[in-house]
Amino acid sequence: MSDRISNNYDITNFSSAKDEFDQVAGGTVKVVSVKASVTFTFGNTEFDDTNNASITLVDTDGLSKTYVIKNDYGASSALEFNAGGNVGAAAENFIILVNGSNGHNGTIGATRVDGAITLTQETAGLGGNTSITVSNWNNITSVNVSAAFSGGVDEVMVPSAMPNRVSVKGAPNIRKQSITKYYKTFIGEQRH
């Protein structure tokens, strides 16, 4: 039997098994950070129902900006935008403002597909899971915005390969290895 697993299949030398995993996987482990995001959808008919509806977004660094929609086409301040003649125009005007120099200017990115808006923090990590404040904003949406950005994660270690591992709950996990620690699974005596 291997010196890493006892006769009852308990792991006896975990760090050695981790070293072996690193060798099998080429020693490469990616560290991935995830950006926080949020979505909402301007309503096809609701997009211009409320004048002066607002949404306040805060980026990872704490920069707060309040965007205001104008359905009377009277947008005059740097953070106001006109609803436009249809939902596509409202969505486009909003993302231009958020992405522009008067808006978050790249610290929060805005994209759209028709009236559906995705806002993404430029800086990945937990710090991007910031709050969102609205005033009558959900009156102009068919899919409301959440109260905060979500999904931001600081660092997740992802191995580039997982040798001989099928799943966390499958047969290779009969020895109760954790989902964050891996070792090479084999049957019988391993030969070098």
Image (spheres, helix red, strand yellow):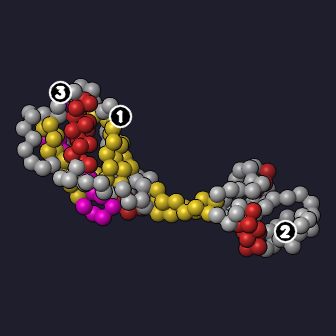
Q: How far is the residue under mark 3 from the one under mark 2?
A: 69 Å
Q: Which residue is mark 2?
A: 5
Q: Nearer the viewer, mark 2 or mark 1?
A: 1
Within 10 angstroms of label 2, few (less than 14), some, or many (20 or more) residues? Answer: some
Residue type indicated by callout 3: Gly
Residue type indicated by callout 2: Ile
Mark 3 or 1 closer to N-term?
A: 3
> Can residue 182 be seen here?
no
* Residue 158 x %, y %: 60, 59
Mark 3 or 2 closer to N-term?
A: 2
Mark number displayed over residue 85: 3
Quadrant (top left, top right, bottom left, bottom right) of the N terminus: bottom right
Mark number displayed over residue 102: none
Query: Is residue 125 found left or right of 179 in the rendered image?
Result: left
Determine whether the residue tagged by mark 1 lies in a helix, strand or loop.
Answer: strand
Question: Residue at coordinates 33% horizontally, 57% vertically from top-left?
Answer: 130
Magenta-highlighted residues: 48-63
